[in-house]
Each structure stands twice: as structure tokens, then as C-alpha cells.
Amino acid sequence: MTYLSLLLHSCRALVYCWSIVLFLFAFPNSVRAVAITDPVGDFLPTYTGTQAGDLDVIAADVILDGNQLVFSGTVNGTVGTTAGTYYVFGLDRGLGAPIFALSGSPLLPNEDKVLFDAAVVISGDGLTGLVADLSTGAPVITPFPTSDITISGNTVTATLPLSLFTTSPAFLPPQQYAFNLWPRLGLDASNNAQVSDFAPDNATASVSPVPEPAGLGLAAFGILFWLFRGRGRTSEPSRAVTASDY
């Protein structure tokens, strides 16, 4: 291989790697896990309210993006169609308890793996948003601005500062948080019959971290290294073995 062809190959490899980095910067959510999905129409048998589409979860996700958490849920109808609807993201920061299986009426023993020690509550009309910290006994309620809430068709999103949740050294690192989403018709915490659906069913799902810029750069240089290494191996000429090699 001539010096010129090696130089051209190196330039092409460098452009390729940095194209990957720029793409990941522009579309960071493309590298995270896909949102969890939930079956259509799987209303809880204990739910006593109207079985409307905006109370039926079909997808949910919580993204850790730098110093913020992005909570997102998609339902089987236009958000806010049913008056009195709320969307609650239960967050397990390491101290989560099976609250639905232990308290409220009726008890939900089949949801004993829905663990949480905090809750993010968003009203279907987008006019109410609050965080309830349940890790210290009596709930500590912190409202957040409605400007943090976005409702678009069937999807509701809240983008909140991470500092709202990292209030104790007893919690796990945010990368290890887990969540569940449930709609409810009414906000009486003692009335579990208001809860229409869980996503995921009787489980929690891990948050989806967005890779840090430093990690993306290292990935690009790793690709570049392997390209050079492979080219170096294939370009080395072979020769016959002679007696002088022994």
C-alpha cells in the first residue's frame, strides 16, 4: 500500500467515525433502549371506572439525560379525553415498596412487584404536576411547573431536574432507577379501584441512560483503532520461510 492510499484510507475512516459521533449527538435517543410496551385493552379487573383509551397504557419510558429525567407515556387514545385522569410514574430509587399490595382498597396482591419510593403525578389536562417522595414516611409533595409537561396526542411527557430525586445518599445511582406507569381516574391514594392499568404488568423497568459525550468519543476512537489495526494486518506482505528463520 502506498503512502497516499494509506492517507486516503485514514481520512475516510476518520470522517466515518466522526459522522457516527455527530449523529449520536444530534439524535441521542436513538442509542437507548426501546420504550416498554403494554397490551391494548388490558384493564385491571379491580378497576371500576370508564374503560377509555386515555386510561389504557400502551408504552412507557423514563430516560436519564444528563441532569434530568424524562418521563414519557403513550396511551390508546388522546391524552385528557376523560376528565379526572392522572398519569403516575412510580420510581424505585432502591427503597421501593410494594405499596399496592400492602395498602389501599382493594389490595392488589398480584402487583407486589410494582415497587416505588417516589411518584411523579401528571394530570391529563396538563395543569397539575407534582413529585411525591415516599421514602421518609409521610409523603413530601413538591409541585413542578406545568411548563415541564408536554402533551401531544396520545403521549404525555414531563422533563424534570434530577435533583428532585437524588435527595438522599441512601438511594441508588440514577442509572439504576426503575419505574412503572399507571393511569388512574381520580387521585384518592387509598382507592386502588381508580388504577386502570400498569406498564409493565407487575414489574418495574430500568431507566434508559443517554450516553455521555465522552463515551461517544471513546467509541468513535475505538472504531478508528480497529480499522487501522485491521488495515495494518491486511496490508503486511507475506514472505516465504527460509532456513535463516530457524
Image (tube, rainbow, N blue to C red):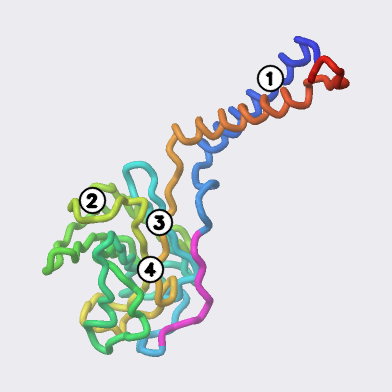
4 or 2: tag closer to the N-terminus: 2
Q: Which residue is mark 2?
A: 166
Q: Magenta stretch: give its range.
A: 35-44
Q: Give the camera-side residue of 186 and 139.
A: 139
Q: Which residue is mark 1?
A: 10
Residue 207 marker: 3
1 or 3: tag closer to the N-terminus: 1
Q: Residue furthest top?
A: 3
Q: Which residue is mark 4?
A: 181
At horizontal 78% and vertical 15% (from top left) the residue drawn is 5
Query: Residues at badges 3 and 2 in contact (C-beta under 8 Å)?
Result: no
The answer for how far apart the CA atoms under marks 2 and 1 are is: 45 Å
Specify the quadrant of the image occupied by residue 152: bottom left
The disc labelled 4 sits on which kind of residue?
Leu
Image depth: mark 4 or mark 2 in front: 2
Q: Which type of secondary structure does the marked residue at label 4 adopt?
A: strand
Look at the image and tell me in which quarter the C terminus lies. Answer: top right
